[in-house]
Amino acid sequence: MKTNSIAHPPLRGNQPHCQTCSLNALCLPLSLSDSDMERLDDIIRRGRPIQKGQLLFQQGDEFQSVFAVRTGALKTYTLASNGEEQITGFHLASELIGLAGYDGGNYPLTAKALETTTVCEIPVHQLETLTDELPDLRKQLMRTMGSEIRHDQNMMLLLSKKNAEERVASFLMDISNRYARRGFSATHYRLPMSRVDISNYLGLAVETISRVFTRFQKNGLIETQGKEIIIADMDQLLEMAGLIDHAECETE
Amino acid sequence: MKTNSIAHPPLRGNQPHCQTCSLNALCLPLSLSDSDMERLDDIIRRGRPIQKGQLLFQQGDEFQSVFAVRTGALKTYTLASNGEEQITGFHLASELIGLAGYDGGNYPLTAKALETTTVCEIPVHQLETLTDELPDLRKQLMRTMGSEIRHDQNMMLLLSKKNAEERVASFLMDISNRYARRGFSATHYRLPMSRVDISNYLGLAVETISRVFTRFQKNGLIETQGKEIIIADMDQLLEMAGLIDHAECETE
DNA sequence: CGTGGATTTGAATCACCTCAAAGGTCGTGG
DNA sequence: CCACGACCTTTGAGGTGATTCAAATCCACG
């Protein structure tokens, strides 16, 4: 399996653009003026879709671009020295990937498509030139990185303090939130990742995930049919996730 | 215990400056030209020391400044809804704190001094003005944030995949590295934090930390005397930490 | 020198893991 | 359209590393 190289000659034509993209209020263009958005749009490359299982980039690859997910979903993971992988995040439409590469010249993680996925590629070299000129874009990038740090620190809390049920509840509520923000149902969605991926992400065994799902279903918290999830008792799940009392439901 | 408010009238005089600070090669000024460094130095406030146990800022406080540790050490932690705290990092001299605040208008975590500590305060408002003009500073900030993301993702791996011994070994090697980079001994140092803090950070019970320290000592890996640590067998610790085989020893 | 917190040690318990095996699901090709 | 195989998911039984509870010891500091 090789790193997918995005189509380099950007096929213009009836290509999508930031200006008309339904995700522009969630994505990088957020808070950009029309003219600024146009300039961002000009440097974005939109390649052919990557298929399930293909890599967008690999740990150690030269850091060349950040990516925004247009459709589909990916997972990012780091490899331990013993070869074990730790999934550090799932990325749905409008979310940015690859910013951690800013630390050095290489990606510190691998990004793999969970299903057929299209992305917008933003070459960092040009992005840096552009951020030199657009303070709003710069702020948005910093905010996105801050948000990533926040997410990771929430995960650290989850991994070191929460039990299996609390972890699964947190996970289901996080996904729910993210779909809701995109205008999809918060209570009925399809998980793009396998149970194995979920277990890896949450630091549990697959069997434990399966058992918790079953228990949740018995207790009327959710209904499941394979990857289809229906949230039946959001309040109780929110409480279990530890999201009920403090601040807003602004998870991710 | 209240948030410590840094002395606002910056007492000039024989104050330290970035230009003469021994940490400038590790800190934010890294890779800045002399004139750029001077401009950064101008906006930095240097307040009176904060005492052990005092807060530099608190989760929920308005995001006003990022801080660089000059001397001493701090811990940063987030609070779960049930009041439990999760330590997300320890910060030694030259390290930056508070960047995660870039996500929103508030700090998403609390910073508390582990010992008497002096910091350089960099007001974000002025920092943003300055980054508008200094591309190198901007890049350095982005790199710092990328490095923070990297650190957190390593912690996720540690928390979900490593056992108690591996976690403690990783921790000892991380601290060793960071002291070494500052020109201190890599094999003989004093931990600024308590066993409780270590256990919290590593997602273990205090008793487990104590037991692992004892076991390491019996096996000749380390010698301990309270907070004093002597690394006796670095190779074996590195291997245990999972840092021997892949890439360089560039942990943090 | 005494006191409160931090650290260490021991014994018992438990949440989750591992191992094993039985369903399910999906894509593929005959 | 169905049969096949590969992989994913679920369920059960038993084991274990780390936790919890309890108590002794050490240490810093007033």
Image (cartoon, coloured by chain):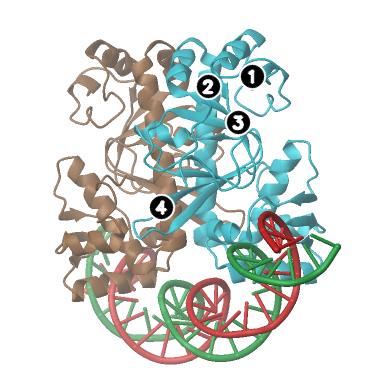
Chain colours: A cyan, B brown, C red, D green
Instruction: Please report whichever mark, 3 or 1, sits nearer to the chain's N-terminal start.
Output: 1
Judging from the image, what secondary structure is the residue with disc 2 in? helix
Q: Is residue C4 above or below residue B38?
A: below
Query: Where is mark 2, residue-wise?
Result: A139
Q: Which residue is mark 4?
A: A79
Say if mark 2 contacts mark 1, CB within 8 Å: yes
Is residue B169 in view?
A: yes
| Residue A31 numbered tag | 1
> Which of A130 and B108 lies nearest the eye of the viewer?
A130
Q: What percent of the width, then of the height, locates residue B236? A: 20, 64
- Is label 3 or label 2 in front? 3
Q: Are marks 2 and 4 on the same chain?
A: yes
The alpha-carbon separation of the residues under discs 3 and 4 comes to: 27 Å
Q: Earlier in the sequence, mark 2 or mark 4?
A: 4
Q: Position of residue A22 (x, y in %)?
A: 73, 26
The residue beneath circle 3 is: A48
Question: Is residue C24 left or right of B189 when viewed as pictured?
Answer: right
Mark 3 or 4, closer to the camera: 3
Query: Do marks 2 and 1 share a subunit?
Result: yes
Q: Chain of mark 1?
A: A
Q: Residue furthest top?
A: A35
From the viewer's perspective, is residue A122 above or below residue B217? above
Q: Amino acid at mark 1?
A: Ser
Task: Have a look at marks 3 and 4 and say if they share a chain.
Answer: yes
Give the Cα distance between marks 3 and 2: 30 Å
Residue placed most toward the observer, A17 or B44: A17
Let me know if marks 3 and 1 both belong to one chain: yes
3D distance between C-alphas at marks 2 and 1 = 10 Å
The residue type indicated by label 4 comes to Leu
Residue depth check, mark 3 versus mark 1: number of the one nearer the observer: 3
Is C8 located above or below residue A238 in the figure?
Answer: below
Identity of the amino acid at label 3? Answer: Arg
